[in-house]
Image (cartoon, rainbow, N blue to C red):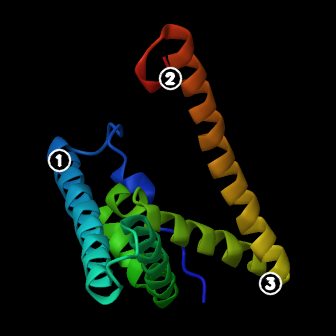
Amino acid sequence: MCLPPPRLLDTLFYRKDVPMDNKLSSIGRAFLTGGLICLAIQVIISALGAVMPPEVPLSLRGAVALLLAGLITVFLTLSGVYAKIADFGGMGANLPFIGLVPALTEVMCEARAHGASLGGAVVAALKVMLVLFGSGFAFSLVFAFACTAFGVGIFA
């Protein structure tokens, strides 16, 4: 079951037709939602620390926690709960890592709605991931070269 994407335009802060008190409340809701999502992931990491052996590195616990958070988000997206969270929290629900999962789920649903096979829908989601991560990697390289050129930071 595919759901419509959250109404992100309602939460953008540059709109002239939205009164200032609405802008401030949407900023507050975004911070509250993003903070609660981060708190939930931290609880998952702490719970994994109590369950996993102590020799397991913290980085692995973080990776497992993000994987679990992604799986929980897929369930919440398909059940329609995450759309309600995103409607309330706006960008606070979409900027954390788990906001990527509903976006990719929506890409797959759109591809399936346009007649793509399951494999085609997965390929469409992988293309989106490639563009997102590829552009992030390219920006990181440009930033690293700029820091090296100007002698700033750890690249100097």
Which quadrant of the rendered structure holds the N terminus? bottom right
Q: Amino acid at mark 3?
A: Leu
From this view, report whether residue 109 is shown above or below residue 150.
below
Instruction: Find disc 2 in the rendering and name its residue.
Output: 155
| Relative horizontal placement of residue 19, taking residue 126 as reference (left or right) | left
Residue sitting at the far top: 150
Neighbour class for label 3 at 10 Å: few (<14), some, many (≥20)? few
Which one is in front, 23 or 56? 56
Q: Residue furthest front?
A: 55
Image x and y of residue 136, in percent: 59, 42
Question: Of 127 and 115, which appears nearest the observer?
Answer: 127
Cα gap from disc 2 to disc 1, whole angstroms: 39 Å
Name the kind of residue labelled 1 in the image. Leu
Q: Residue at x 63, y 50 (%)?
A: 132
Question: What amino acid is found at the position of numbered circle 2 in the picture?
Answer: Phe
Which mark's residue is nearer the viewer, 3 or 2? 2
SS of the residue under disc 1? helix
Say which residue appears at 25% left-offset and 77% top-offset: 46
Q: CA distance from mark 3 to mark 2?
A: 44 Å
Where is residue 9 shown, x and y percent of the image?
43, 53
Q: Is residue 116 visible?
A: no
Reading the image, the residue beneath label 3 is 118
Spatial CA span between label 3 and label 1: 42 Å
Please determine whether, in this image, residue 131 is positioned above or below residue 88: above
Mark 1 highlights which residue? 24
- Give the mark count: 3
Q: Residue at x 76, y 80 (%)?
A: 112
